[in-house]
Image: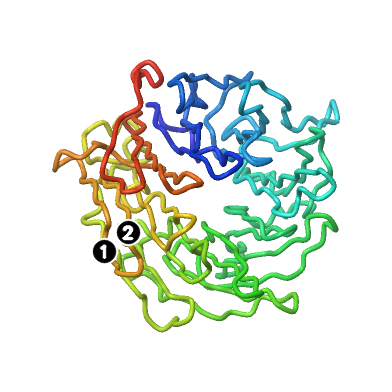
C-alpha cells in the first residue's frame, strides 16, 4: 500500500484536460505522505497551491473530472475521497470515512483506484466509483460528484477476495481481484453500477489481478487484465459475457504486470512489467508482440519489509516492486507511448517502428531523474509531457518534439526534502 514509506516520494502527475484545443494550463502532483501530499501547479504563471485536506494522507489515486473542472483524490490510509475545484483550489466535498455510529457511508481505511464513468454527463450527473482495499472493506461505492453525495454500494462487498484494481467501461466497472482462499484462480468481475448487479465474471490462473483497462474497438468492447504472474488476458464483452480472445505467456522471470492499456486509436495494446520490458501488440495480430521495448537493466532494489532500517536513498536504488516500468501512457493523437522506469529512464516510443523518438537516460548517464520515475503524463494536445520521481522532482518536457526540456521553477519550495 502507498503511504508506508518513511521518505516523501512523488507518486503520480496529471495534466488538466482543459476545454478546447489549447495547451494544458495546469498539472496536479501527488505524494506518499503529508505535508504537500497533493499540489496543483499553474503552468501559465508558475504559481502552485497545496490542496491540504483535514487528516492528510498519502494519495492512492488522483484524477480530473468534469472536463478538468474537478480534482478527485483518494486517501491511502484515512478512507477519504476529496473533491476539489481545480480553478480555485477549494475543497468542495469529502466522502467518508465510514462510521457506523454516525451512519456515514464510505470506506474504512484505504481507498483504491478511482473510476470516472464515461457516460456520467447524462442529465448533468458526474458519477464516480471507488473501491476499498482493507480486509474488511471489499465494497465498490458509487458517488455523485456534482451533488456531493453517496448513491449506493455497487457490489454489496465480497469478504472472500481482495479488490486490487478497477476501471470504468461506459456505465460499468471491471474490477480485478485476488484468488479465492480455496482456489488457485484470480478473478475479474464486470458490474452494472446503476443496477448494482454483476453482469459476468471470468477466472484465470494467477495470484492477483493488479491491472485492468477497457476500450471500445470497432463497436466491440474489450477489457484486459494484467496479473501478478506477468500474464495479460483480453476479453470480449459482447453478449454480456467475457470471451477470452487472447492471453500472453506467464513471465519466466517472475516479473509482475505494472501497466497495461489500449492505445486511443484502438489498434495497439501495451503491457509493461517489473522486468523493465514493455510489449506492444497489434490488436489485428495476436500471435507475437509487434515490438519489445527494452528499457535496460532494472534498478537495484531493497525490501523494507525485510530490513526496515534501510531507506532507498542511493541513486538507482528503489523499493522492491518499483524496479521496472512504473508508468506508461499513450499519446492521444498518435500511436506513441511515454514510459517511466525505476532506473530513472523516461522514453517516448514510436510504436509503429518500435524505437524511441526521444530517450532520457538514467542517473548513471547524467539523466534528468536520479531515482525511480513513478509517474508520467501526457497533455491533452500531446504537446507537453511530465514525469515525477522518488527524489521529489517533477520534470516538464516540451514542445511536441520533446527535444527541449526544463524543470519547474522553485521545486525545492514545492517539494522540500524531509
Report whether 207 appears left or right of 183: left
Residue 256: x and y, percent? Answer: 40, 59
Residue 357: x and y, percent? Answer: 27, 56
Which residue is at a point 73% across and 70% down the rendered structure image?
200
Secondary structure at badge 2 equals strand
With respect to residue 396, does 131 lie above or below? below
Question: Which label number is shown at residue 349?
Answer: 2
CB under 8 Å between discs 2 and 1: yes
Which residue is at a point 34% across and 34% down the rendered structure image?
395
Give residue 171's quadrant in the image. Answer: bottom right
Residue 288: x and y, percent? Answer: 37, 80
Secondary structure at badge 1 equals strand
Report whether 98 appears left or right of 310: right
With respect to residue 149, does 378 lie above or below? below
Report the residue marked by disc 1.
Answer: 355
- Colour scheme: rainbow
Residue 238: x and y, percent? Answer: 70, 77
Closest to the observer: 292 or 6?
Answer: 292
Closest to the observer: 209 or 49?
Answer: 49
Residue 237 in view (yes/no): yes
Closest to the observer: 244 or 264?
Answer: 264
Give the CA separation, mark 2 to mark 1. Answer: 6 Å
Question: Which label number is shown at residue 227?
Answer: none
Closest to the observer: 95 or 361?
Answer: 361
Report whether 306 appears left or right of 343: right
Which residue is at a point 62% across and 25% down the rendered structure image?
87
Give residue 241's quadrant in the image. Answer: bottom right
Which residue is at a point 60% across and 65% down the rendered structure image?
215
Amino acid at each position: 500500500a502507498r503511504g508506508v514509506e518513511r521518505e516523501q516520494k512523488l507518486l503520480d502527475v496529471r495534466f488538466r484536460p482543459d476545454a478546447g484545443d489549447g495547451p494544458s494550463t495546469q498539472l496536479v502532483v501527488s505524494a506518499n505522505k503529508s505535508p504537500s501530499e497533493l499540489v496543483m501547479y499553474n503552468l501559465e504563471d508558475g504559481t502552485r497551491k497545496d490542496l491540504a485536506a483535514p487528516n492528510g494522507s498519502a494519495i492512492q489515486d488522483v484524477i480530473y473530472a468534469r472536463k478538468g473542472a474537478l480534482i478527485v483524490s483518494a486517501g491511502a490510509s484515512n478512507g477519504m475521497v476529496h473533491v476539489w475545484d481545480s480553478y480555485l483550489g477549494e475543497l468542495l466535498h469529502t466522502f467518508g470515512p465510514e462510521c457506523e455510529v454516525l451512519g456515514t457511508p464510505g470506506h474504512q481505511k484505504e481507498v483504491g483506484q478511482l473510476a470516472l464513468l464515461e457516460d456520467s454527463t447524462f442529465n448533468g450527473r458526474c458519477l464516480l466509483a471507488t473501491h476499498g482495499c482493507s480486509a474488511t472493506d471489499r465494497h465498490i461505492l458509487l458517488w455523485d460528484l456534482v451533488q456531493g453525495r453517496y448513491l449506493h454500494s455497487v457490489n454489496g462487498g465480497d469478504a472472500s477476495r481482495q479488490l486490487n484494481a478497477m476501471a470504468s467501461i461506459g456505465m460499468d466497472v471491471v474490477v480485478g481481484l485476488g484468488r479465492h482462499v480455496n482456489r488457485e484462480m484470480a478473478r475479474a468481475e464486470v458490474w452494472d453500477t446503476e443496477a448494482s448487479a454483476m453482469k459476468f465474471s471470468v477466472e484465470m490462473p494467477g495470484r492477483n489481478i493488479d491491472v485492468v483497462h477497457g476500450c471500445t474497438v470497432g463497436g466491440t468492447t474489450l477489457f484486459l487484465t494484467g496479473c501478478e504472474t506477468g500474464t495479460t488476458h483480453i476479453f470480449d464483452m459482447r453478449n454480456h459475457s467475457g470471451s477470452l480472445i487472447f492471453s500472453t505467456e506467464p513471465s519466466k522471470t517472475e516479473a509482475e504486470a505494472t501497466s497495461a492499456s489500449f492505445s486511443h486509436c484502438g489498434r495497439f495494446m501495451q503491457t509493461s512489467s517489473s522486468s523493465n520490458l514493455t510489449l506492444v501488440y497489434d490488436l489485428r495480430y495476436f500471435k507475437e508482440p509487434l515490438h519489445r521495448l527494452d528499457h535496460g537493466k532494472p534498478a537495484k532494489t531493497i525490501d523494507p519489509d525485510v530490513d526496515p532500517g534501510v531507506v532507498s536513498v542511493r541513486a538507482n536504488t528503489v523499493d522492491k516492486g518499483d524496479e521496472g516500468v512504473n508508468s506508461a501512457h499513450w499519446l492521444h493523437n498518435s500511436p506513441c507511448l511515454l514510459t517511466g522506469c525505476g532506473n530513472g529512464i523516461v522514453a517516448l516510443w514510436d510504436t509503429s517502428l518500435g524505437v524511441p523518438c526521444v530517450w532520457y537516460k538514467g542517473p548513471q548517464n547524467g539523466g534528468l531523474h536520479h531515482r525511480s520515475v513513478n509517474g508520467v503524463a501526457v497533455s491533452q494536445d500531446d504537446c507537453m509531457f511530465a514525469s515525477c520521481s522518488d527524489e521529489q522532482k517533477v520534470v516538464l518536457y516540451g514542445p511536441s518534439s520533446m527535444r527541449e526540456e526544463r524543470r519547474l521553477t522553485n521545486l525545492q519550495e514545492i517539494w522540500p526534502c524531509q
